[in-house]
Image (cartoon, rainbow, N blue to C red):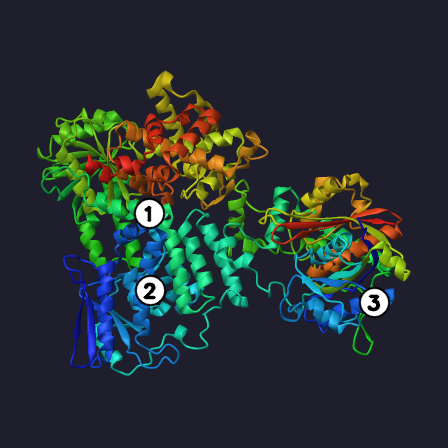
């Protein structure tokens, strides 16, 4: 079987996903184009250098609709003979793009791909593409649909994760992200976003709040309590699925959940021959990929079963993994992962995560693969696992190994 | 038969009048629909007719669809139901389009509805298809769509039209909660257009005024008020509606789900397609065994029982003067509902102040009614005037029915019986409202046991719809007829059962409570127990219900049962008794002591389960499957109902079903215990019994009758239903 290797990974800094965020003025096409151009320039990709651009995006409406992948390729400096494929696995879209590309290469369908994703959450708000899962009664009722925040709180309730646990984790994410930036640990990957004249627009993750402490977080109101307990009463729906729960413990708030941001990332993946022909050095092998469907109501527990699956399929054990990147959609998601595998916190999200820096839905999967690779190299470790929880009850994972 | 007639006036208005011969209220049959269709065709084709008014020849518009028609359609399968419903849609759509050109909306004739009074179901759906609705200014008239209450939903365009007219949010209470409005409120809500003294005159005037009459949804650019599902505001509405319906109905009822789908799918397509979608979902609900069972129990059989289906032959036994012995909570409630029904009441207690207090209950109730606009000071004076509170037995001299509601003690009751019988006329019927003592035993104190009967009310009397009539061994037919005629007077639903421990309703509910408590002792999370019960459609979980009825009562019943049964007392009751006695010793008597299975705040509001339970009975991990818990709770009740039938306590399964739903709120979607067993089938029921017996003990042992039915492939309604009884 042909092996798939990562040759390069870039990402944009993440802007606050609000009208006053620095990237709000940038279009999805422009931001994505700058990531593709960076990959092209850094690796001298001329002509039909890659088979396809696979672009993850969770909200394929408005400027992100109409096969944004192809539109972005056309806007970029890549050759028009390279097509484009937009995909959606919600929060794991960026990871799924990488995994799909890797598996295409392993299967012999093309020598190289650019895979990644984008989410301009300030410009194309979450949910603006509609979602039958929430509104169509034939699924929403029978599958007990609740919003993700409620699901995160159900995880906390089910697995005994307290508000303090979640807040402490959030504080740690902030501190680690700050330290990583201070030490320039993201330097290899960050592509400054620029305007039409080349003037810089954003060069760092502006969502970070380094001063965050327990006291500050303690003052925040739980975000999902009202919609759970009063209108429209999602807790009652949750109880239909989990009748042993008397009540849901609403622990999540803006400070211990992922931030809404704008951002994009791209990864260059190719076969050994692809690198040799172009004088490019592979940085890591994509050792395994996995995805899974899980209970859609508690929804966000996917990282545990998908990790079990990927380890089982590769004959590895949790001890074989040197570093973990578990997307910080909500604190309880990561803390449940830590609890299930008894993972050493020093191996997990060592440079912070989405709670501190934000979670641009369709891009995050590609971002954390890049972050994991950078950190494996920096700390001279071998094997890393990245995983995300996914809306509607899914999970995705990737294991990479330095070469 | 002619249900609809038409008169074409010289003014150019054709008035179509709906007036079912020989009925007090109009209901729509398929023949009637055809008549209406022909008349509308005639009027639309007649050049002399400028406009049409549709009205009723009765004081009301109509009570709804003839539910027997729906039952009949069902025998033809989904195709027949769908086609039948589409026929109605075509008729109503013809009225709505009124001959207009499809594309330009040109031409056509205005059609107005003139509604004289109450309009329910199709009685409102027909006006909704007209271009303008005029309603008589009658505050007593009720307008609404009650279909959801019998397990279906408005299926003759009512769903599609009301949603397009009001938007999802505003239509929801009418569609999902069967909200009824008087004409003024309906006008305010936007359901009807004008409330006038003479709706026919006003309607005529309007159709002649050359009005604009295209429905908004038939014009270009129509937008759903509040937004369709993929409009940002509409999205939130639909997400919320799904959650609310799921939560409020505990996912137990099929009709609200189907209704929501009809709405969600319907608002995304043009109107005619939406009607087709409504018909498809409506058909699915009709084909669901739940709706037939609900219609059968809550509509057809409930009415049959109220009209005296099981009344023995006897002359009119309506009560003129009632003596109520004991002015406690039950006595006071009985006095209230009887006086409201126009019956003269003597309310007797040992002390005058106690009797007065009982009468004051009615006064307070009526005062509240005045405040809420439900009654008037004149009415109050009239009703209260019918109740005499006294200690004097002589006032019973001319009573024709006595109901005693004194302390639950054989000796006390015997003395009252004797003292009363010394005064009352020889033909007066004597009834006991006991809930726990055998009627045959109480009748021993009577000199005329054939005139002695049980009339068992549920608490609170004015709210609970069921009355259980209990025949003692010697109770005669006239006593039964008397009790039935009385129950009909006070507009409640009767069931007639034979004398046995706890009669019927309490007999079935006690095992339900015990099973819930038993699960707690096994380590099933108490929340799991009560939530699973609610998901079955039970109005209250067993633990909450024990708190409501009080733990000392549970302890008292357990002790009395033990004393009565002696060695036969089931050994598997030990764990439950232990739990109940422990709570009792802890002073946790339930709601009345603000502490029981649940904790309560100072105002008596439940705040959550008492953590002491988990400390004593740690939760199993993992918890049992939902189905397992639900089967235990369900079979605890239905097996008792089957045993009651086997033992002859129940003589009519219709009473078993109606009594269960009205008496203790047994999962209404199922149509009652016997209907539910018919839905799952005797064979499946036996399978589940065997599993439960093996896992949890002999209390789930398969009744002989059920096993026999499984072997023969019989159903309860096939074997014991009224048709089967007729054939035999």
Residue A357 image-quadrant placement: bottom right
Label 3: how many Cα within 10 Å (few below 14, some 14–19, many 20+):
some
**Residue located farthest toward the top when viewing the structure as drawn:** B567
Q: For residue B45, which quarter of the picture?
A: bottom left
Looking at the image, residue A277 lies above or below residue A241: below
Check contact, mark 2 vs mark 1: CB within 8 A. no
Would residue A360 be seen by someone viewing this image from the given angle? no
Q: Nearer the viewer, residue B125 or B521?
A: B125
Q: Are marks 3 and 1 on the same chain?
A: no
Q: In screen coordinates, is B478 left or right of B277?
A: left
Query: For the residue labelled by badge 2, is the local secondary structure a helix, a strand or a loop?
Result: helix
Q: Chain of mark 2?
A: B
Residue marked by disc 1: B292
Q: Is residue B638 visible to the viewer in this orientation of the structure? A: yes
Q: Position of residue B680 (x, y in %)?
A: 39, 38
Quadrant the C terminus of chain B occupies: top left
Residue A33 rendering spot, x and y as whole percentages? 76, 70
Mark 3 to mark 1: distance in Å? 68 Å
What residue lies at 18% left-to-right and 24% top-to-bottom? B444
In this picture, is A71 found above or below A161?
below
B510 sits to left or right of A135: left
Residue corresponding to mark 2:
B89
Q: Nearer the viewer, mark 2 or mark 1?
A: 2
The chain letter for the residue carrying disc 1 is: B
Percent x, y for residue A360? 71, 61
Q: Is the residue marked by circle 1 packed among few (<14), some (14-19), or many (20+) residues within 10 Å?
A: many
Q: In this rendering, would B503 be left or right of A334?
A: left
Nearest the eye: B436 or B10 = B10
| Quarter of the rendering containing residue B724 | top left
């Amino acid at each position: 079987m042909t092996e798939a290797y990562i040759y390069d990974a870039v990402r944009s800094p993440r802007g606050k996903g609000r009208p006053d965020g620095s990237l709000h003025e940038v279009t999805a096409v422009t931001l994505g184009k700058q990531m593709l151009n960076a990959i092209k320039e850094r690796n001298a990709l001329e002509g039909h250098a890659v088979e396809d651009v696979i672009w993850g995006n969770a909200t394929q409406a408005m400027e992100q609709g109409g096969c944004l992948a192809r539109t972005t390729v056309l806007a970029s400096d890549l050759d028009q003979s390279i097509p484009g494929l937009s995909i959606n696995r919600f929060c794991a879209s960026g990871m799924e793009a990488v995994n799909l590309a890797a598996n295409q290469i392993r299967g012999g369908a093309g020598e190289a791909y650019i895979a990644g994703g984008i989410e301009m959450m300030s410009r194309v708000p979450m949910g603006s593409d509609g979602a039958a899962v929430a509104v169509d009664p034939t699924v929403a009722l029978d599958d007990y649909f609740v919003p993700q925040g409620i699901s995160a709180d159900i995880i906390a309730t089910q697995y005994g994760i307290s508000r303090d646990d979640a807040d402490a984790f959030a504080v740690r994410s902030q501190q680690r992200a700050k330290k990583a930036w201070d030490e320039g640990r993201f330097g290899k990957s960050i592509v400054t976003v620029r305007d039409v004249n080349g003037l810089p627009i954003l060069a760092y993750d502006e969502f970070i709040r380094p001063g965050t402490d327990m006291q500050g977080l303690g003052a925040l109101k739980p975000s999902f309590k009202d919609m759970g307990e009063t209108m429209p009463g999602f807790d009652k729906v949750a109880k239909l699925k989990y009748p042993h729960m008397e009540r849901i413990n609403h622990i999540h708030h803006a400070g211990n959940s992922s931030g809404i941001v704008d951002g994009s990332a791209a990864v260059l993946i190719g076969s050994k021959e692809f690198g040799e022909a172009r004088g490019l050095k592979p940085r890591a092998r994509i050792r395994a990929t996995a995805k899974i469907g899980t209970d859609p109501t508690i929804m966000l527990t996917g990282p545990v079963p998908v990790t079990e699956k990927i380890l089982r399929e590769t004959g590895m054990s949790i001890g074989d993994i040197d570093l973990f990147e578990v997307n910080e959609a909500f604190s309880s998601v990561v803390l449940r992962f830590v609890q299930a595998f008894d993972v050493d916190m020093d191996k997990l999200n060592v440079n912070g995560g989405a709670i501190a820096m934000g979670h641009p839905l369709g891009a995050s999967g590609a971002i954390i693969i890049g972050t994991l690779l950078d950190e494996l190299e920096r700390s001279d470790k071998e094997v890393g696992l990245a995983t995300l929880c996914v809306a509607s009850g899914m999970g995705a994972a990737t294991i990479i190994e330095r070469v | 038969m002619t249900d609809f007639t038409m008169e074409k006036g010289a003014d150019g208005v054709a008035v179509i009048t709906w007036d079912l011969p020989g009925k007090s209220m109009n209901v729509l049959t398929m023949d009637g629909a055809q008549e209406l269709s022909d008349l509308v065709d005639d009027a639309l084709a007649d050049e002399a007719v400028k406009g049409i008014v549709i009205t009723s020849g009765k004081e009301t518009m109509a009570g709804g669809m003839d539910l027997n028609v729906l039952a009949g359609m069902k025998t033809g399968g989904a195709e027949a139901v769908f086609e039948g419903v589409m026929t109605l849609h075509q008729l109503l759509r013809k009225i709505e389009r009124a001959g207009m050109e499809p594309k330009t909306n040109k031409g056509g004739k205005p059609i107005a509805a003139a509604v004289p009074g109450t309009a329910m179901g199709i009685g409102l759906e027909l006006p909704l298809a007209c271009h303008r609705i005029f309603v008589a200014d009658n505050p007593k008239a009720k307008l609404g769509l009650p279909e959801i209450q019998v397990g279906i939903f408005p299926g003759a365009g009512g769903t599609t039209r009301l949603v397009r007219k009001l938007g999802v949010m505003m239509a929801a209470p009418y569609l999902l909660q069967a909200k009824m409005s008087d004409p003024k409120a309906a006008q305010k809500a936007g359901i009807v257009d004008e409330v006038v003294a003479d709706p026919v005159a006003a309607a005529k005037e309007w159709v002649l005024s050359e009005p604009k009459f295209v429905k908004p949804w038939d014009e270009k650019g129509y937008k759903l008020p509040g937004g369709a599902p993929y409009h940002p505001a509409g999205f939130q509405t639909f997400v919320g509606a799904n959650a609310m319906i799921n939560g409020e109905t505990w996912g137990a009822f099929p009709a609200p789900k189907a209704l929501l789908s009809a709405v969600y799918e319907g608002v995304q397509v043009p109107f005619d397609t939406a009607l087709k979608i409504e018909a498809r979902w409506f058909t699915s609900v009709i084909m669901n065994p739940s709706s037939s069972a609900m219609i059968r129990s809550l509509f057809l059989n409930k009415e049959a029982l109220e009209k005296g289906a099981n009344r023995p032959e006897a002359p009119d036994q309506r009560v003129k003067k009632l003596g109520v012995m004991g002015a406690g909570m039950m006595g006071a409630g009985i006095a209230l509902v009887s006086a409201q029904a126009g019956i003269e009441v003597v309310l007797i207690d040992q002390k005058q102040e106690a009797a007065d207090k009982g009468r004051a209950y009615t006064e307070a109730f009526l005062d509240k009614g005045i405040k809420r606009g439900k009654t008037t000071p004149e009415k109050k004076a009239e009703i209260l005037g019918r109740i005499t509170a006294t200690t004097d037995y002589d006032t019973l001299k001319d009573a024709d029915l006595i109901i005693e509601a004194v302390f639950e003690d054989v000796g006390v009751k015997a003395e009252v019986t004797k003292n009363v019988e010394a005064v009352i006329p020889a033909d007066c019927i004597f009834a006991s409202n006991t809930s726990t003592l055998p009627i045959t035993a109480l009748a021993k104190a009577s000199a005329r046991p054939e005139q002695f009967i049980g009339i068992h009310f549920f608490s609170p009397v004015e709210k609970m719809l069921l009355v259980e009539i209990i025949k003692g061994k010697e109770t005669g037919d006239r006593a039964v007829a008397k009790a039935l005629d009385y129950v009909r007077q006070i507009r409640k639903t009767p069931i007639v059962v034979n004398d046995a421990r706890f009669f019927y309703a309490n007999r079935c509910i006690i095992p339900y409570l015990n099973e819930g408590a038993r699960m707690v002792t096994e380590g099933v999370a108490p929340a799991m127990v009560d939530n699973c019960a609610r998901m079955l459609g039970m109005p209250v979980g067993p633990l909450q219900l024990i708190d409501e009825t009080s733990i000392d009562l549970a302890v008292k019943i357990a002790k009395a049962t033990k004393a009565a049964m002696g060695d036969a007392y089931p050994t598997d009751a030990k764990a439950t008794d232990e739990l109940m006695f422990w709570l009792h010793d802890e002073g946790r008597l339930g709601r009345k002591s603000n502490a029981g299975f649940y904790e309560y705040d100072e105002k008596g509001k439940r705040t959550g389960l008492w953590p002491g339970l988990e400390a004593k009975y740690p939760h199993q991990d993992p918890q049992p499957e939902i189905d397992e818990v639900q089967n235990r709770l369900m079979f605890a009740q239905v097996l008792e109902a089957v045993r009651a039938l086997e033992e002859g306590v129940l003589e009519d399964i219709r009473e078993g079903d109606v009594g269960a739903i009205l008496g203790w709120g047994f999962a209404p979607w199922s149509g009652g215990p016997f209907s539910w067993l018919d839905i799952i089938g005797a064979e499946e029921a036996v399978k589940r019994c065997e599993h439960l017996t093996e896992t949890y003990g002999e209390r789930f042992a398969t009744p002989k009758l059920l096993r026999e039915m499984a072997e023969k492939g019989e159903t309860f309604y096939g074997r014991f239903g009224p048709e089967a009884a007729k054939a035999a």
